[in-house]
Structures are given as C-alpha cells and as structure tokens.
Image (cartoon, grey):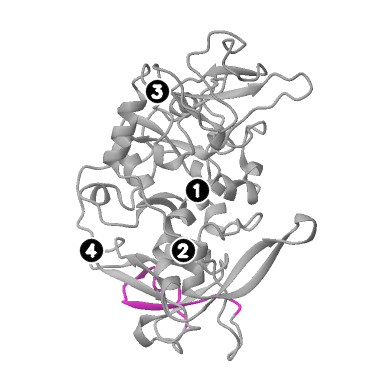
C-alpha cells in the first residue's frame, strides 16, 4: 500500500516548444506539463522525452535544448528538468531550412508503433495477464479476480474495472490492429477492447480521475510509476511517482493510455498560430492505408477534431443509479432468425427498453421488453424474423464515459 505521507507538489508548468516555429506569442509551445517530479518544479527527463516523442510521430531518440541553438542536454547529467522552457528535437536532426518536423494532431491520428515501443517501455518486466485467472465470462470478474486490489492505491474496497484503451476508441483500436496484443482473439466490434490485457482494477474515485485523463503510468527505474498530469485535491500528493501494484497487462496498452492522456494537453498548439505540419493516415486505392505529411490550419484542425465534452462524475453517478434500477431500463439487441442470414445487430440499432413498453429506435423496426416468445405478438405489423434478448446489466464492469454502451456480455 502506498505511504500515507503527502508530498507537496509544485504547480509549476514546464513548456516544451517546437523549434520549427517562431517563439513570438508562444505559438511554438507544443504542450505544458506540470513539474510534479520535484518539490521546486521539475519533471523526469526520460518521461518528458517519451511524451514529446509520442506527439512527434513516435521518435524515441530525441533530445532537449534550453535554447533553440543551445547545447543538447545530457539525460545522465540532468535526470530532472528544472527549467521553464525546453525545445524538443527528434534525432536525427532535420536540416536547416526544411519544413518543421511533423507531429500527430490528436490521439485519433496517432499511429501505434508496432515493433517499436520506447526502449524504456520494453525494459520493464510485466507479470503474465493470465495469472490468477479462471474462465469467467465477465471481464470485470476476470480483472478483479486477477488484481484483487486497486493497482494504484492497493485498496480492496470499491473496485471497478478500468480500460487502458477506452471503449470509446474502438475505431482507433481496429485501425491500429491492437488485437495483436489481446489474449482473447474471438472478440468482435464493439467488444474488441474488452480483453484482460487492456484492463486493470481501480478504486472507484481513482477510476473517475483516471477517466478524466489526469493519470497514466510511465516506466522509471525499471518499474511502472504513477504519473499525474493535472492538479488533484489529494490523490496526486499521495500517489504521484509511487510504484504501481503489479500491472498484469500488455505494455502496448500502457503506452496507449499514456498517449490518450497527453494528446489533449497539446490541443492548444493546433488551435492557434500558423499552419502545422502533421502526419495523417488515409485510405488509398483498394482501402490500403497511406501515410501523408500535410499542413493543417487551426480551423481545419477544429473541424476534423472537435473537442469532446467529458461526462462529469455527477452525471456518471446519476447514470449508474439509473442503470442499477433493473425494472426501469434495459439494453437489448435483436438477432435475425433468417436461416440464410443470422445477423447480430449492434451500435445505433440498439434500443432502450422500459417496463411500460418499448421505444422504437429505427423507422422500420419496433421492439418490446421483456421478451415473451421467439415471435412477436400478432397483429403488430412487424416481421417475425426477429428474436429479442434481454442483456445482463453489470455496472461494476466500467464507467459510462469510456465505453460505447453499458453492456458487459451478450448471451444468445
């Protein structure tokens, strides 16, 4: 369990600049990070390099300079960055006069570095995700059975299952072939993120902060450390820079969580100033992915990546209370019973049912709850090819803000 002593954390923020743009009006600040790693305001040198490397198109051999034309800082001599401003240069250096080095504009654009994890991530030993696991069909039960306690606080009460790559990032997950790091290779959309290598147990209040993109895990001194990216009332002072409990997950998902956490911190870099040189991926001929370097204006950036509203803890609590009322609302799917075409229907074709009747979520199909037979009641004008299933509701599985819906499993 983490120590009870609470350290004072500095509110100093350190600015990391892109040398390819002018210092005028601070238009070259890529991101600002809190200096929580030192009482006087400092951040771990290697952690900062990894974070800037993620944004700068997965460059793991970069370096910092305190001045644009200054000397390269030595990681061994300066393990903690105590200054106010640093310029990040990817190695090898680009020649003078060329376009600014490219960056990823958002997590959606970030391309996972298969076979090219940061060296510090690959060097941390990880326990097997299969340890202490039987064969439960429910992800939450599997994760809580494996971890036993919160991976940050080591508390055993009030535990919830937290995804590293959030469930609302399914498109990114699929586009980057993240199933390569999953144990369960039978998961399909929209449940591909529900693998035990992509989930950990967290105490419910820490889960809230985790999903607010204030916490991630970073490798330091050969182990995983807890890193806070925003000010908190008590959690940061108690747990920042402490070792995690054993993380029985794949390092690929720890890196994914770090990237998902830090990209919002770089948003201001793209919302003002000159056009930015960015790397994107588009579908080419025959739907083959193609990488391109383009210049993106701030207006184009805001159009392509509108800021998403976060679900507040109060709203999540209300949603949780409502979902726990089993008699008031259920989530259901329907399955085609056509012998030639048995089809499972997901997504926006999912309806919410109440005990007082049904709500039609599609113009051509109406549904009802609870299911009473394999065929619809007569005289309702509907096709008889649909069978209805009531789904289990398990709110311990995850939160409303990091998944596409509230279902834990489908039993058909």
Using residue 391 as the reference point, say whether residue 289 is left or right of it: right
The magenta segment is 72-92
Circle 3: is it few (<14), some (14-19), or many (20+) Cα within 10 Å?
some
Q: Position of residue 342 (x, y in %)?
A: 72, 23
Whether 394 is among the magenta residues is no
Mark number, residue 75 = none
Secondary structure at numbered mark 1: helix
Q: CA distance from mark 2 to mark 1?
A: 13 Å
Q: Answer above or below: position of 24 versus 318.
A: below
Of callouts 4 and 1, the N-terminal one: 4
Asked whether residue 52 appears in the rendered view, the answer is no
Pointer 2: what residue?
51
Depth order, front residue of 157/411: 411
Q: Position of residue 182 (x, y in %)?
A: 61, 38
Tell me the quadrant of the picture where the C terminus can be found.
top right
Mark number, residue 254 = 1
Using residue 362 as the reference point, say whether residue 338 is left or right of it: right
Pointer 4: what residue?
10
Which picture quadrant has residue 14? bottom left
């Amino acid at each position: 369990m983490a120590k009870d002593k609470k350290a004072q954390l500095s509110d100093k923020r350190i600015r990391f600049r892109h040398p390819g743009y002018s210092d005028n009006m601070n238009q070259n600040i890529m991101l600002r990070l809190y200096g929580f790693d030192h009482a006087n305001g400092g951040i771990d040198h290697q952690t900062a390099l990894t974070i800037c490397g993620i944004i700068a198109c997965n460059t793991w051999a970069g370096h910092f300079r305190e001045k644009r034309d200054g000397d390269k800082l030595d990681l061994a001599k300066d393990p903690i960055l105590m200054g106010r401003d640093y310029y990040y240069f990817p190695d090898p250096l680009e020649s003078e006069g060329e376009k600014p080095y490219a960056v990823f504009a958002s997590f959606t654009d970030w391309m996972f570095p298969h076979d090219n994890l940061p060296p510090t991530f690959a060097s941390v030993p990880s326990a097997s995700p299969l340890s202490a696991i039987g064969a439960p069909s429910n992800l939450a039960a599997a994760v809580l059975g494996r971890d036993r306690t919160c991976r940050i606080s080591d508390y055993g009460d009030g535990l919830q299952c937290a995804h590293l790559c959030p469930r609302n990032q399914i498109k990114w997950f699929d586009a980057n072939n993240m199933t390569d790091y999953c144990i369960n290779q039978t998961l399909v959309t929209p449940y591909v993120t529900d693998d035990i290598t992509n989930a950990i147990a967290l105490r419910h209040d820490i889960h809230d902060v985790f999903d607010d993109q204030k916490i991630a895990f970073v490798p330091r001194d050969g182990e995983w450390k807890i890193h806070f990216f925003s000010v908190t009332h008590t959690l940061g002072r108690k747990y920042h820079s402490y070792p995690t409990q054993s993380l029985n997950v794949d390092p690929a998902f720890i890196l994914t969580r770090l990237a998902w956490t830090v990209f919002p911190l770089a948003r201001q870099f793209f919302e003002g100033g000159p056009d930015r040189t960015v790397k994107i991926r588009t579908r080419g001929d025959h739907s083959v992915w193609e990488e391109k370097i383009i210049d993106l204006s701030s207006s184009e950036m805001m159009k392509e990546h509108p800021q998403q509203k976060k679900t507040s803890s109060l709203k999540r609590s209300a949603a949780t209370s409502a979902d726990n009322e089993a008699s008031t609302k259920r989530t259901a799917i329907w399955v085609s019973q056509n012998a030639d075409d048995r089809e499972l229907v997901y997504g926006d074709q999912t309806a919410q049912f109440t005990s007082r009747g049904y709500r039609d979520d599609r113009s051509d199909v109406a549904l009802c709850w609870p299911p009473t037979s394999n065929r619809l009641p007569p005289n309702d004008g509907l096709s008889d090819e649909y069978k209805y299933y009531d789904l289990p509701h398990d709110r311990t599985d995850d939160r409303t803000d990091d998944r596409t819906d509230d279902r834990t499993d489908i039993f058909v």
